[in-house]
Image (spheres, rainbow, N blue to C red):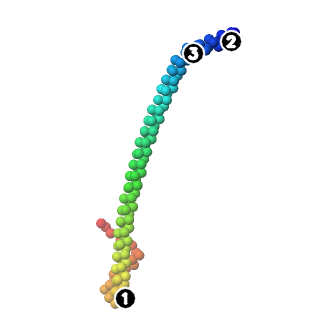
Amino acid sequence: MTKLWLIALSAAVLAATGPAAAQAQDEQAEAQRAALNREQAELARRQVEENIAAQRAYEDAAQAREIRIQAQDREYSRILAEHRQAMNQWRADLAACERGERSRCAVLADPAQPKEPATR
């Protein structure tokens, strides 16, 4: 009988304090969830900002690389055109020299030999 009385008393105490305690516990859990959600949202916002900055940096570097490649291609084309022109002139001078035009023989040079660097 004593056991029954203790169980009944415990049930009564729990019934009286249960809803208030449960509500307080729920409010505390909700406050913790809200704080964690705010923290997570801030971390996500920072991550997005970092991703945007990294994307911009990549795009800027890619654009600078493309500009550099285009400049190198123009320089290569210019040098190649100069080389072709020099080779054509050399071949023409060689053919003229072989035909007996001695004035053209004096200008023969080995086109494979580098020229003195031009000053600009």
The residue nearer to you, when weighing 3 against 111, is 3
Q: Taking 1 as reference, is 50 left or right?
A: left
How many numbered marks appear?
Answer: 3
Mark 1 or 3, closer to the camera? 3
Query: With respect to residue 87, does 27 lie above or below?
Result: above
**Cβ atoms at labels 1 and 3 below 8 Å apart:** no
- 3D distance between C-alphas at marks 2 and 3: 18 Å
Identify the secondary structure beneath mark 3.
helix
Q: Which of marks 1 and 3 is nearer the N terminus?
A: 3
Q: Taking 37 as reference, is 95 left or right?
A: left
The residue nearer to you, when weighing 44 against 74, is 44
Q: Where is residue 71 in the image (x, y as percent from the top left)?
A: 36, 62
Query: With respect to residue 8, does 108 lie above or below?
Result: below
Q: Looking at the image, which residue is at 30% across and 66% down?
A: 120
**Cβ atoms at labels 2 and 3 below 8 Å apart:** no
Q: Position of residue 113 (x, y in %)?
A: 40, 75
The residue nearer to you, when weighing 15 against 66, is 15
Q: Where is residue 107 in the image (x, y as percent from the top left)?
A: 33, 81
Mark linked to residue 98:
1
Q: Which of marks 2 and 3 is nearer the N terminus?
A: 2
Near mark 1 (Cα within 10 A), the count class, few <14, some 14-19 or many ≥20, is: few
Mark linked to residue 15:
3
Q: Looking at the image, which residue is at 37% across and 84% down?
A: 94
Q: Name the residue under label 2.
A: 3
Q: Looking at the image, which residue is at 40% across and 57% down?
A: 65
Q: Picture quarter containing residue 86?
A: bottom left
Which amino acid lies under the numbered mark 3 shown in the image of this protein? Ala
